[in-house]
Structures are given as C-alpha cells and as structure tokens.
Image (spheres, helix red, strand yellow):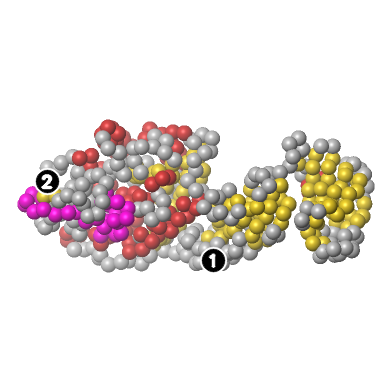
C-alpha cells in the first residue's frame, strides 16, 4: 500500500512527532496518519461532497485479524488470552453499526523480545514487519512503555496496544482500528498542542477543509485526555463557544464517554476495507456448545502436578478451545490460560492443591461463547530426589478398567515395590514386583485406585478403575 520512499517519509514524520510526545505529556494514542492514507481519505471525502456515497449500513463483512502477544525475552508479561478474547468481543460490539465483524485468521503468535515488549519505536519499525501476516489486520499486545496506550503505524501497517490499556470495556483498540481504516482524530491538526492555520467552525461551514474533514463530527481542538463533558469551553473562529462531542471514538474523551463512529466515518472505513481487499462475506459466527470434559475424572485426587493431561470431547465446527485452570476454582487467578487447537493439553502446576478446570469451544468469528461446567482434581508433587518415569513405556496394567474381583495383571521391566491406595489415599495392599514378571491381582470394591511403584529412587503412578 505504501512505497519505500513514502514509508521513509512516514518514519521521519512519526519520529519527529514522537519526540514531542515524549517531551510533553504522555498521550493515549501516538498515531500520525500517513500521507498516502490521508490523500485517499480526502479523495473519498470529495465523494461525500458530491453525494455519491450511500451512508446507510451495508451488509456485514468479515475482517481477519492476526493476534501477536509480546513478552520479554524470558517469555514474561504476556497479555492474557482471557483479555484478548474479551477484546475481540468488545470491538465486534463497537463495530456493529459499521457492518464489520472481526475474526481470528490464525493461532496466536507469541513473541519474546525485550524491545517490542517495551514498545520501542525503533524495534516496531524494524522488526514488526517480520512478524506480521499479509492480508489481515495485525494487532500486537505489548507489556509496558510510557509513550502511548495504542498506536497505528501506517508505514508498517500494524496496530500496537499496551496491555494495561485494553481492559474490560476499553475503547483503545477500537480507536486504533479506526486509524487503521483511515480515520484521523476528530482534532486532526491539533496533535501535540499544535494550532492549525484554519480552525473548524462549530456551524460546519468549513468542515470539509479543516479538522478531520468529516461534517458529521463536531469541531474539536482538544489533543489531551478529557472527561465528559469537557471541563472548559472552546471558542471557534466566529467567537462561538462550544464543547466537543465526547461520544466519538476518534476523540480523546475518556473511554466511558465514547460510544460511536459517525455515519461519514463508518462510510470511510467501509471504503478503506474495499480498497484493501481483506474482507470476506461469510464466517461462522455460531455459538457452539461447551465441550464435554473427559479426563481427569471429576474429583480425581491423584494428578501429578508436573504434568496434568486434560482431555475433552471435540465440538463440531470449533476453530479452537479456550482452556482455563484455577486453583480452588478462583477464575480471576488463572494457572492456565490457553487457546488450544486440539482436544488435549498438558499443564504444569504446583503443590498438593485442589484445582478446577473448564473449556469452551469457539469459532474464529465468535469468541464470546460461555463455558460449560467445571471439573476438579487434586495434585501431588513427586518428592525431591525422585524422578518420574514415563508410565506408558514402563508399566503395563491390563485390563484397565477392570470389574470388581476380576483379575488384572501388572508387568514392569524392573524390580519394584507396589503400593495400592484408594481414592482417599488409604492403603489397600503392598506387594513386591519382579523384573519382567507378570503378576496378577484383584480388588473386590469398586472405585478409583492409585498404583504407586517405587523403583530405585524413581516413582511411577498409574490409575486403575474398578467397575
């Protein structure tokens, strides 16, 4: 969309403005619209003048997004999957009147890079293009940085959002996507406390040639965050006092004030999407049922904390599954927060604690479905000095499950001590096992049992279900 010469021009413009932002008060958004982008917008606004644009809502178009979550070089500081899915729900709500619906184009891209995590402008200009996917909206969530909450880089064509600035009901991402789709600030020309030569009149008489160029967005001269209504009044060139419209997403009013794009802004974004050619006309927005949890069995009290294998049944039409694990079922403090593209996941936990887990199925275009019921399990930790053997390779138990009083056999290629406990941890029996010898046992009472084998300082545990 931009040639190399124009990109260099945009880079120089961005850094000159960024220097002013860094010296002055930190801003919510550091976006400066690209020259070519503004040229295209002005051509479209001429169509608004001629009356050739239909401002009515168009049919829904589906727009692919690629999510990049940036941590530091140690993989610390990732934006949570929970927040990311919520952010997609929020922007899909905000863009309903525009006719846009965003969907996941691919799995999440996790990036471990200190400079990108810090929101370094140099790093974004130099490296973001290496990570981006073509033909989609590329959104990067990064951890820290004081220069902005969100920014759209026109030369690289990516959006960067600071983690702390996109929480429940935040409009930061909505604002930056407005920039991505060609919208300038409502106070265009006033960025960084500049004073443009021509100020927009509140009566709209010069609305096409000043400000953002839209005639259905009110004059706005405020390039700093403000509560609604504005605490002071503004004065236009005709000496008329007024307050700017706090409801427009492209203003700098606080998030709770904002609720809409104007009709002309929405038409401009639809035009921009057509020019980009990145939208589709269909996507699966079905609300899928929650998957049925498979294992561990609900209430299992013997799961190795170093690697708990969780399994669930597939749901037809699912793009992915969102998995949560929380100690004591305290969902606000997640021990596992993961998007899974299979029906199984191994999670590393800690200690001897009760955990709850739950899964929801999502389509690429509907991340807002609900969880089903949660199941619980309790973990144990292998004592220090013990190494956990791979059970499938070392221990054979057959049949499993087994009926009460039915004989089952155990075979292991080592001498070992077998200790069998019930689900309450009570001892059922002990027995020595001998290398490469198959030995048979039976248990009369139905339930879940744990086979514990100690082999020269190594431990094996396996479940046996007696039906």
Q: Quadrant of the C terminus?
A: bottom right
Majority secondary structure in the magenta region = loop
> Is 54 left or right of 150, judged from the image as shown?
left
Task: Provide the residue span drawn in magenta.
Answer: 236-262
Residue at mark 2: 198
Relative to 117, does residue 200 appear above or below in the rendering?
below
Relative to 434, does residue 168 appear above or below in the rendering?
below
Residue 245 colored magenta? yes
Image location (x, y in percent) of residue 440: 92, 55
Residue sitting at 49 percent across and 59 percent down?
367
Q: Is there CB contact under 8 Å for labels 1 and 2?
A: no
> Is 436 left or right of 226, judged from the image as shown?
right
Say if residue 40 shows up in the picture: no
In terms of image quadrants, where is residue 203?
A: bottom left
Image location (x, y in percent) of residue 67: 46, 48
Residue 76 colored magenta? no
| Distance in Å between CA atoms under marks 1 and 2 | 53 Å
Residue sitting at 53 percent across and 38 percent down?
75
Relative to 116, does residue 273 appear above or below in the rendering?
below
In terms of image quadrants, where is residue 25?
A: top left
Counting residues from the start of the chain, the first of labels 1 and 2 encountered is 2
Residue at mark 1: 288
Residue sitting at 73 percent across and 52 percent down?
302
Image location (x, y in percent) of residue 111: 50, 40
Image location (x, y in percent) of residue 204: 13, 57
Relative to 267, does residue 461 appear above or below in the rendering?
above
């Amino acid at each position: 969309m931009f040639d190399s010469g124009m990109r260099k021009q945009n880079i120089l413009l961005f850094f000159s403005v960024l220097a002013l932002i860094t010296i002055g008060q930190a801003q919510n958004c550091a976006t400066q619209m690209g020259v070519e982008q503004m040229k295209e917008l002005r051509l479209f606004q001429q169509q608004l003048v001629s009356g050739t644009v239909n401002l009515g809502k168009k049919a829904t178009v589906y727009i692919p997004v690629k999510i990049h979550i940036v941590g530091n070089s140690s993989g610390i500081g990732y934006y949570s999957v929970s927040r990311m899915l919520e952010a997609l729900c929020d922007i899909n709500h905000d863009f309903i009147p525009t006719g846009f619906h965003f969907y996941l184009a691919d799995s999440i891209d996790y990036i471990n890079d200190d400079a990108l995590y810090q929101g370094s402008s140099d790093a974004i200009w130099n490296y973001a293009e290496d990570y981006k996917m073509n033909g989609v909206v590329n959104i990067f969530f990064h951890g820290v940085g004081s220069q902005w909450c969100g920014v759209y880089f026109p030369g690289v064509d990516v959006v960067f959002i600071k983690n702390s600035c996109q929480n429940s009901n935040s409009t930061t991402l909505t604002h930056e996507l407005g920039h991505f789709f060609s919208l300038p600030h409502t106070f265009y020309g006033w960025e960084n406390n500049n004073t443009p030569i021509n100020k927009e009149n509140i009566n709209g008489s010069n609305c096409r040639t000043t400000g953002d160029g839209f005639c259905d967005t009110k004059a706005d001269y405020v390039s700093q965050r403000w509560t609604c209504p504005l605490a002071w009044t503004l004065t236009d060139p005709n000496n008329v006092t007024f307050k700017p419209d706090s409801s427009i997403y492209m203003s700098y009013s606080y998030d709770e004030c904002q609720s809409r794009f104007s009709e002309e802004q929405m038409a401009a974004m639809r035009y921009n999407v057509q020019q980009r050619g990145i939208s589709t006309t269909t996507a699966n927005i079905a609300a899928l049922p929650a998957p049925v949890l498979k294992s561990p069995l609900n209430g299992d009290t013997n799961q190795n904390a170093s690697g708990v294998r969780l399994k669930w049944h597939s749901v037809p039409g699912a793009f992915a599954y969102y998995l949560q694990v929380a100690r004591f079922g305290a969902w606000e403090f997640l021990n596992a927060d993961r998007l899974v593209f299979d029906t199984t996941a191994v999670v590393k936990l800690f200690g001897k604690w009760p955990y709850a887990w739950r899964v929801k199925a999502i389509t690429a275009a509907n991340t807002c479905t609900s969880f089903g019921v949660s199941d619980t399990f309790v973990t144990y930790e292998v004592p220090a000095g013990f190494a956990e053997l791979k059970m499938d390779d070392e221990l054979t138990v057959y049949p499993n499950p087994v009926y009460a009083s039915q004989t089952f056999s155990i075979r292991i290629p080592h001498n070992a001590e077998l200790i069998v406990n019930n689900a309450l941890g009570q001892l059922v029996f002990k027995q020595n096992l001998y290398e490469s010898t198959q030995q048979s046992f039976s248990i009369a009472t139905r339930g879940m049992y744990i086979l514990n084998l100690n082999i020269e300082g190594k431990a094996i545990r396996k479940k046996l279900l007696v039906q």
